[in-house]
């Protein structure tokens, strides 16, 4: 069993920054890909960024390229999402997930409870 706990969400003004963290426990964290997803009411959950087990290969949605950075520390079993130049349209509940690859089609099996990010204009 895997437990994922996100933290770092909150309210920020447009152009500001936040860093999300996701701490994992209960399984071999370093063997799996990790992803950050977000969801707003009435819309499907979307992949924002993902990172492979080594931390070398990363994926970013076009909407966040150049503004968000995903990273991981396998010794701490933690994945991070540094979010800069935030926009009101980044407002969402952000979830971290543990999976088998960089893309949702490869399967994300474990999810955190989510953390709210609100960007005011």
Image (cartoon, rainbow, N blue to C red):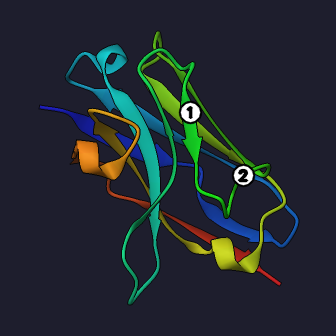
65 in relation to 121, above or below: above
Please tell me which residue is depicted at 59% across the width and 58% down the height of the picture.
9
Foreground of the two, 71 or 64: 64
Q: In which quarter of the image is the C terminus?
A: bottom right
| Mark 1 touches mark 2? (CB < 8 Å) | no
Please tell me which residue is depicted at 32% across the width and 51% down the height of the picture.
104
Q: Is residue 28 left or right of residue 90?
A: left
Q: Position of residue 76 (x, y in %)?
A: 47, 16
Q: Quadrant of the N terminus?
A: top left
SS label for mark 2: loop
9 in relation to 44, above or below: above
Foreground of the two, 28 or 59: 59
Where on the picture, by quarter, is residue 42? Answer: bottom left
Q: Is residue 112 left or right of residue 12?
A: left
Q: In this view, does 68 lie to the left or right of 4?
A: right
Q: Where is residue 73 in the image (x, y as percent from the top left)?
A: 53, 18
Residue at mark 2: 65
12 in relation to 105, above or below: below
Foreground of the two, 79 or 64: 64
SS label for mark 1: strand
Where on the picture, by quarter, is residue 17? Answer: bottom right
Foreground of the two, 63 or 17: 63
Residue at mark 1: 58
């Amino acid at each position: 069993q895997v437990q994922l706990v996100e933290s770092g969400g909150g309210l920020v003004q447009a152009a500001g920054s936040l860093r999300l963290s996701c701490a994992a426990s209960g399984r071999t964290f370093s063997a799996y890909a990790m992803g950050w997803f977000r969801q707003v009411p009435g819309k499907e959950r979307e992949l924002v960024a993902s990172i492979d087990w080594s931390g070398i290969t990363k994926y970013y949605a076009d909407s966040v390229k150049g503004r968000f950075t995903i990273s991981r520390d396998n010794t701490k079993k933690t994945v991070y999402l540094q979010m800069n130049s935030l926009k009101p349209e980044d407002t969402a509940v952000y979830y971290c997930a543990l999976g088998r690859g960089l893309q949702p089609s490869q399967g994300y099996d474990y999810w955190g409870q989510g953390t709210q990010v609100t960007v005011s204009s």
